[in-house]
Each structure stands twice: as C-alpha cells, then as structure tokens.
Image: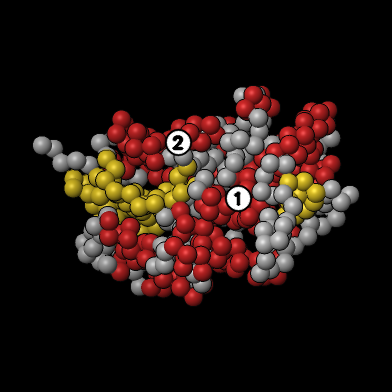
Amino acid sequence: MPYTVPQAPSTVDAAIWPSIATVPSSLKARVAGRAADAIFKAAVRRLPLEVRYPDGTVLGKAATPGRTYPVMIMNRPAAFAARLGDGGLIGLGESYMAGDWDADDLTAVMGVFAARVGSLVPEPLQKLRALYLPRQPRKERNTEQNTRSNISRHYDLSNELFATFLDETMTYSSALFLESGEALTGVAWDGFAAAQQAKIDRLLDKAGVGAGTRVLEIGTGWGELALRAAQRGATVYSVTLSSEQQELARRRVAEAGYADAVTIELKDYRAVEGEYDAVVSVEMIEAVGYEYWATYFQTIERVLAPGGKVAIQAITIAHDRLLATRSSYTWVHKYIFPGGVIPSVRAIEDITEKQTGLRVRERLAMGEHYAQTLRLWEERFMARAEEVRGLGFDEIFQRMWLFYLCYCRAGFETGYLDVQQIVLDRPVAG
C-alpha cells in the first residue's frame, strides 16, 4: 500500500457515527450474527482470500511459493459478525469503518467479494433477504422534495474536501486516458487532468457542440464541462442541486471570462424550460432514482431541439443485478449516495424506446478507465490525510471514504460495474 490507513479511535462520537459507536446487541443481531458468521466462514473457505483471526486461525487460501492472496485481518470477530448479521453488506462497510477488520489491500479484498456477489449467500437464503435487510427510507426517494437533500449530503460536504483528491479540473467522474490494456494500469497523476478533459471533449464532440450551440448540462459538477463548451463558442445553461458546487463553478466560470456565456442555476432537472441543441449529463443519472429514469429522459426529449443530440456518461450494472438490487438499501446509500440507483444499458434502451422518442445511437464502454481514475483519487486522498483531518473529517470518515473508493474500484476492476458514454437523438420523421 502506498499509504498508511488511519486506525479507528477507541472512542467513537456517537452523535456523529451512531451505527459505528455501538455494536448491535439486540436479539435479532445476536441470532442473525451467528448465522452471518457461519455463512461468511463457509463462503471464505472457497474464496481466493486469506482471513486471519486473532487466535491464529486462518480461513480461505493460504499463501504458497509464488502465489499470494488478498489478506483480510479480523480485529474483532464478534463485532464483525454482529454488524454483518444486523445489516448485511451495510454491516460489512460499517465494521471496516469501526476497525473491526482491516486489509492489506482493500480493493483486492473487495474485488474477491464483487466477483462472486451473486453466490456468496446460498440461494435459498437469498430469497429471504427482503424479510430482514433494511429498505430504502421514503425520505430518500428522489422526489422533487427530497432530491436536494440527497444531493447535498454528498456534494455539499466541502469543496475543500473534494479538492484534496480531485485534479485541477475538479472533475468527479471517470477520466478517459490515452493508454489502454496493461499500460492503462500504470497511468500517473501528471496526465490525469488531460484525461479528464479528453472525456469531456469526447462528449461535447458527440453532442455536436460548437460555436452558437445551445447546451443544457444536467449536473454541473464544478464547472469544467461548461467551461470547455463555452470555449468552443457555445452558450451553456447548467443546473445543479449542490450549492457548494454552484458557488465554485460560478467562480471558475467568471475567472475564466465566460460569465456571459454560462448560466449555472440551483434547479431540479425536471424544472428546466427552453430549447437546446445539445444536452449533456455526466454521471448524474445514477442519482435520479429507478422510478424517475423515464422522467429524466422525457425531460431531455422535451427540451431537445429538432436535430439535437444527447450525450451522457453513466455508470452501469448488468441488468440481472439491477433487477436483484434496485430496491435494496446498501452501505453506499446510507453513507455516500442516498437515493441512488445504477442503471443497466438495457434499462436505458428500454425506457428510451418505450417512453420517449429518443434512441441510443452509440456507446463507448470504459470501465477500466474508471478503475484507474479511482486508484488515482484513492492515492491522492490518502496522501493528504493530514489535510483532510485539518478540514474536520475524522478517522472514521477517512476509513469510510477509503472504503467507498476501494469498493467502487473493485466493482470496475472485476466488471461488476461499467461506465458508458451514450449518444442519443430523436429519429427524423420519414
């Protein structure tokens, strides 16, 4: 590891981290904990993973000459089992945050689980998951009343926090590197900003953005796409629900001299009016919510001028996994992206074909690029741990954020997740 992982403090502030400060001890947690422990140990025995317990017990695959496996270190096995039993995969993340377990390579450990996520729990028990696993809170459904709060909980954490690990473009989505294959795994920080701009430029090219183009951007980020569109001579109307992002994006636009060409408003995408030659949206559909994907695309169709094009970048998941998990409440929902659901390509194609006049014309899959994007963010974030702590984000937060970055990276490295640039338009009549 190119960094040292902060250890969870012995005393946790229950006002900030209520689920971390106390190990579940209800009857349900005790009973489910014993079952979860048995299921976990049975699964581990057949996984390419080494799990080390404090008493010296080692489960899984032991290292052999010339062959090693990711190592999961159990610090507090009983607490791990109780959290896993009480919250399923939410408990897996919470137990890491609490320091109940550690890993020599967290991404590799999570990759072992991600590659086999559909078979870790015996099939008969999978059918019972809805009976005991938590459900998404109604207050986190992405209605127009709730969405602002959902977005704020992540994107309004602190512009300074995001600046600790993003490159100078302040772009918080997958880059598109020049490298491919084995060379891609060695991409370095000094080419990161250019790779982020290459991703943006490809989207703008596919949407036909040039001088005089009227562009709608759904999801401003911190303004880099709007800036690059304005540099082409386009006029940009960009909407966000993050006040922190709006403030910094407006400042960046003004400092670059494009305030007359770019408008950034705090507005739900459903409230957008007007007509636009191009609509672009980068990794925003994941925050829309399963029930509102049709509304998202219908809104885009409503404001798209005749002959206009749409270019979106979307994290995607296999369709069978979408169907299995779309109503689940996960660790990512609880701690990172409340209300989010990752779509499948099939869901996007079905919804646009059946409920809009838009049609998917082109796709570029680039999941391996996201894995390296996340690696660079992870290394940068951990290298600046002291700065993060100085901003008021404690060791529990840092372990949470590391788990998030590694959890996602493992998803892309194993192919459980992908990211696509998708081009759509409306067929010309006749």
Q: Nearer the viewer, residue 311 or 234?
A: 311
Quarter of the image holding residue 386?
A: bottom right
Q: Residue beneath label 1, please?
A: 111
Q: Residues within 10 Å of mark 2 (few under 14, many from 20)?
A: some
SS assignment at label 1: helix
Q: How many marks?
A: 2
Q: Is residue 393 visible?
A: no
> Which dot, 2 or 1, sits closer to the camera?
1
Q: Residues within 10 Å of mark 1 (few under 14, many from 20)?
A: many
Q: Residue at x 62, y 27 (%)?
A: 123
Using residue 370 as the reference point, say whether residue 333 is left or right of it: right
Q: Quadrant of the C terminus?
A: top left
Q: Quadrant of the N terminus?
A: bottom right
Q: Amino acid at mark 2?
A: His
SS assignment at label 2: helix
Q: Residue beneath label 2, please?
A: 319
Spatial CA span between label 2 and label 1? 20 Å
Q: Nearer the viewer, residue 143 or 68?
A: 68
Using residue 426 as the reference point, say whether residue 16 is left or right of it: right
Measuring from the top left, give residue 417's x and y in whole percent: 50, 47
Measuring from the top left, give residue 419's x and y in whole percent: 44, 51
Quarter of the image holding residue 395?
A: bottom right
Measuring from the top left, give residue 261's x and y in whole percent: 30, 64
Using residue 93 as the reference point, say whether residue 253 is left or right of it: left
Q: Residue at x 65, y 30 (%)?
A: 122
Q: Residue at x 53, y 31 (%)?
A: 324
* Furthest residue toward bottom: 190
Using residue 354 as the reference point, say whether residue 119 is left or right of it: right
- Residue 240 lies, with reference to residue 142, above or below; the image says below
Q: Is residue 355 visible?
A: yes
